[in-house]
Structures are given as C-alpha cells and as structure tokens.
C-alpha cells in the first residue's frame, strides 16, 4: 500500500536555491524507504516537506502535491500540528529535553492534553520498548536524560516520537554521530518498527542505505535520479550516475 504519494514536487528557497525539482515518488507502508545521495541533494528538504517543517524556513515556491493517505498535506487547510503528530521526525543530533528520561516521553503528550497517569506510563514504556531502550533505562526513568550515552539519547529521541503514536517516522541521518554498536541497535529497532510504521530514512552512508533499504531513492542536486527496490537499486542500478555513486566513484 502507498502511504505517501509525492507528485511533481518543486521546492525553491527564498534565495533562489532550487532544492527539489519535479520529484515524484511513492512511499510504501510497512517498509523502510531510504533517500540517499551526496550532500546538497535535497534529502533533508524533502523530509521537511513531509511534515511541513519547511513552513518555518523562508521558501519562495512549493508546488506539486504530497498525498498522505490520499490527502494533500501541502493544502493550506492542513492542520499542521496534527500532521506532525502523524508524521514524526528524528534528527541527526539527538536533542533530548533537559528533564528526566520519563519526562522526555510524557512532555509532548501532556502538552497535547493527556492527564491520565496510567496512559502516560503506558506511553513511556511503549515508546522505550519500541526504540529498543527499555531494558537499559527501566530502572532509572527519573535520571536526567542527558546522563544517557549518545546512542541512548538518539534512541530516546526515537522513543519520544513513537510515544505520540505516529504513522510515519522520518529519520534524518539518525546515526551519523554514533558508534557501530549504537548504530546497529537503531537499525535493528527500525527493522522491527517497519512492521507497523512507514519509515523514511536518510542514511549516513551508502553502506547503511544498502543494509536497511526495502526501497531506495537516489537524489542528486535536487533531482530524483532513480528509485527502486533496495536490492535492485544497489545491485543493478539503471542510471550511470547511481552506479557511480553506489560504487564510490564520487560523493
Ligand atoms: N533554509 C535554506 N535556505 C536556502 N537554501 C537551503 C536551505 N536549506 C537547504 N538549502 C539548500 O538546498 C539544497 C538541498 O539541501 P538539503 O535538503 O539540506 O540536502 P541534503 O539533505 O541532501 O544534503 C542545498 O543546495 C542547500 O544548500
Ligand atoms: Mg541533509
């Protein structure tokens, strides 16, 4: 099933930079779609379109459509707060809130009006378990979040997104600062999560792209060069530019 259908998306920033040019791409539910390519390709810009974070930057032109379950989220009538709950984002640098591990998970829900203690506790446990962090922190939920290691903080950010029960999870180079063991834990968590979520990942390397991608899309300077099933794209790329990048000839 296509959870998201992107049609002829163009994005131009206020300074004239055309960061996305005529992008069309379908994103499957219950799978990991990887957006990869060299820096400046437009990957982060595309993620920011998917939960309307670009509303916060100076954008000159956005055109095209992004259908989430058939509804165009670029429509001005979209409830952006509700959208961002459905489409959660994890960034490259874990930004934990300066509060306890537990409060990092309950904060957003309390802001959204959740008062039930038992429901908040459930959300804490659910989020931490889904992010494969529960076993490491269950006995220290009231410790400050900043006392966690970098890898744990990154999974806490993932847990925080998951506590909101999103449908789509966007991850922008979530393991770029992490050691291989923490990276492995995040990747394992994503493999488990994809059973129930739509996951869109910008990986920090071609190797991670090849390891994790059910579907992959190669971006170069604002253009979507090629999209296919992961295995297909990494073993039999159709475009010369994809092949050159996958084989390490540039970037
Ligand atoms: N807020 C912004 N204002 C102007 N240009 C931007 C902004 N954000 C990104 N860009 C430009 O858009 C292009 C795509 O950037 P980005 O989406 O960050 O690519 P990637 O994530 O693939 O590295 C780059 O040329 C970048 O400099
Ligand atoms: Mg980026």
Image (spheres, rainbow, N blue to C red):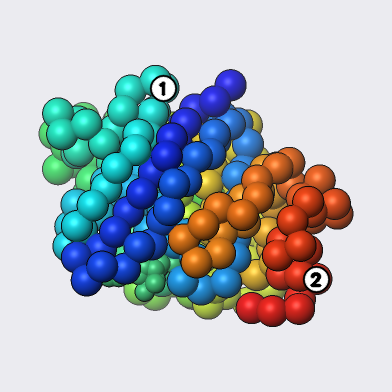
Residue at the image point whose x is 52% and y is 47% from the top: 200
Q: Which sits in the foreground, 160 or 33?
A: 33
* Left or right relative to 57: residue 219: right
From the image, tell me which residue sits under label 1: 69
Residue visible at 76% across and 62% down? 240
Q: What is the number of the mark on residue 247?
A: 2
The reply, left or right, for residue 9 in relation to residue 31 is: left
Residue 162 coordinates in the image, percent (x, y) = 42, 42
6 or 30, nearer to the observer: 6
Residue ID at (46%, 71%): 40
Looking at the image, residue 235 sits to the left or right of residue 228; the answer is right
Q: Residues within 10 Å of mark 2 (few under 14, many from 20)?
A: few
Q: Quarter of the picture for ligand 1?
A: bottom left
Q: Are marks 2 and 1 in contact (CB under 8 Å)?
A: no
Residue 157 location (% of width, % of height): 40, 58
Q: Specify the quadrant of the image occupied by residue 207.
A: bottom right
Q: Percent x, y for residue 84? A: 28, 41
> Residue 229's image quarter?
top right
Which SS class for mark 2?
A: loop
Which element is circle 1 on? loop
Q: Earlier in the sequence, mark 2 or mark 1?
A: 1
Pinpoint residue 197: horizontal percent, then vertical percent: 53, 34
Task: Left or right? Give the position of 101 relative to 15.
Answer: right
> From where the camera sits, is residue 91 visible?
no
């Amino acid at each position: 099933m296509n959870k998201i259908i992107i049609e002829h998306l163009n994005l131009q920033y206020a300074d004239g930079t055309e960061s996305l040019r005529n992008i069309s791409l379908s994103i499957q539910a219950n799978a990991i779609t990887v957006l990869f390519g060299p820096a400046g390709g437009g990957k982060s810009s595309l993620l920011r379109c998917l939960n309307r974070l670009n509303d916060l930057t100076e954008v000159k032109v956005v055109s095209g459509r992004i259908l989430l379950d058939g509804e165009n989220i670029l429509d001005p009538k979209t409830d952006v707060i509700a959208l961002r709950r459905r489409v959660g984002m994890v960034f490259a640098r874990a930004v934990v809130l300066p509060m306890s591990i537990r409060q990092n998970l309950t904060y957003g829900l309390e802001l959204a009006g959740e008062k039930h203690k038992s429901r908040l506790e459930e959300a804490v446990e659910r989020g931490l378990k889904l992010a494969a962090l529960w076993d490491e922190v269950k006995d220290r939920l009231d410790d400050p979040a900043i006392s966690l290691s970098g890898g744990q903080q990154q999974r806490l950010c993932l847990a925080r997104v998951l506590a909101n029960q999103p449908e789509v999870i966007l991850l922008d180079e979530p393991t770029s600062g992490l050691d291989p063991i923490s990276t492995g834990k995040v990747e394992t968590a994503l493999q488990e999560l994809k059973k129930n979520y739509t996951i869109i990942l910008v990986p920090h390397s071609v190797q991670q792209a090849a390891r994790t991608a059910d579907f992959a899309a190669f971006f170069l300077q604002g253009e979507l060069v090629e999209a296919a099933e992961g295995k297909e794209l990494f073993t039999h790329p159709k475009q010369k530019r994809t092949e050159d990048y996958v084989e390490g000839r540039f970037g």
